[in-house]
Image (tube, grey):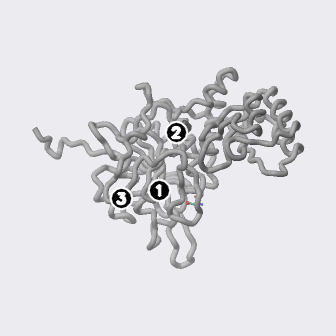
Amino acid sequence: MKKSDATIKKTKILLIYTGGTIGMVKDYDTGALKAFNFNKLIKNIPELGQLDCTIDSISFDVPIDSSNMNVEHWVIIASIIEDHYDSHDGFVVLHGSDTMSYTSSALGYMLENLRKPVIFTGSQLPIGDLRTDAKENLITSIQIAALQEDNMPVIQEVGLYFEYKLYRANRTTKINAEHFEAFASLNYPALIESGVHLKINREYLFRPNSSKKLKVHKLMDQNVVILKLFPGFNQITLHSILNSPNLKAVVLETYGSGNAPTDEWFALELKKAMERKIFILNVTQCSGGSVLMGHYETSKHLEKLQVINGKDITTEAAITKLMYLLGNNISPKLFKTICETSLRGEMQ
Ligand code: ASP
């Protein structure tokens, strides 16, 4: 028996507006970009009315450029999702592209046992611009967030949609400040490709392996740093960074497949830091590929020191993972093992 229209439940999507270029309109008198009135969103994009879902929206009191994003903002986004988790089927977060990979990676960790879509999107041009990429990004993100099969959301993870592709958010990096194709996910295929149809790459979708309730983690420890190696990097700098007050963990961006100088002072500084219970996580500064500790002589010493292997994780997913694990007071004995384990599909 076919259900009458009145009994078919419409999918409910919550749009969370944090700021970024997408939400700016040009003031034609001054020529400057300014945040648009979010309540008038539907009026600005009448196409939204054609979507077969109910859209509610919530906005940051003061929308921000994502260069101003911080941990407190991440907690606000996580809390909004927590508060609306039972009443809504999916979430779309409008966010500036500059730090979108960081925020969306962080949210992935913060939202443990997530079973609903959380789709981050933004744009390179404001929504009011004639050639804007904002409308397509926003409309398709909402469609993806509303996708259901057998009454279950198709996407059950944090995604990032930009320029016809949905990626696993914690696999992305912003790679271009000019092109509409601003993000790449070099170590993991797109989850959905948008063409005439939405092509869902089902085998790559994340499925949490427990049926536990959503657990929202709000403690992210900020006593971390990213340290990128370059030829000429010297001991004084390394020493002073590793001796920063309260430092608890370091993402060490090494060369190629996880390689670093074999100078004695280098290994010694790392060793002393590790003795002070500072965790060192080895990630590659290459955009694609993986750390393979021990593959070259130039990473054997790191392996011997028991530096944590970041495998093919992005820097964005690595630094937020450290913040999350430290915030959760993981015991130092388990820290390396947990950090080397994929928690949300962020590494192989
Ligand atoms: N600076 C902007 C931001 O990240 C750029 C953008 O929205 O794409 O907020």
The residue lying toward the viewer, choosing from 206 and 304, is 304
Q: Dot 2 lies on which element?
A: helix
Q: Which label sits on residue 35? A: none
In space, the residues marked 1 and 3 are separated at their CA atoms by 13 Å
Give neighbour class at mark 2: few <14, some 14-19, many 20+ (Cα, 10 Å): many
Instruction: Tell me the amino acid under the disc marked 2.
Output: Gly
Residue type at mark 1?
A: Phe
Q: Is residue 106 left or right of residue 153?
A: right
Q: Quadrant of ligand 1?
A: bottom right
Q: Nearer the viewer, residue 252 or 75?
A: 252
The residue at the point 57 percent across, 72 percent down is 32
Q: Is residue 248 visible?
A: no
> Which quarter of the figure is the C terminus placed in?
top right
Closer to the N terminus: mark 2 or mark 1? 2
- Whether the residue carrying mark 3 lies under 8 Å from ligand 1 is answered with no
- The answer to whether mark 1 and mark 3 are in CB contact below 8 A is no
| Residue receiving disc 1 | 162
Q: Is mark 1 within 8 Å of ligand 1?
A: no
> Which residue is tagged 3?
195
Residue 297 locus on image (x, y percent): 76, 37
On the image, the x and y values in percent for residue 187 come to 54, 45
| Res. 102 in view | yes
Q: Which label's residue is closer to the chain start, 3 or 2?
A: 2
Q: Is disc 2's CB within 8 Å of ligand 1?
A: no
Q: In the rendered image, which residue does mark 2 sit on?
A: 108
Looking at the image, the residue that sits furthest to the front is: 296
Amino acid beneath label 3: Gly
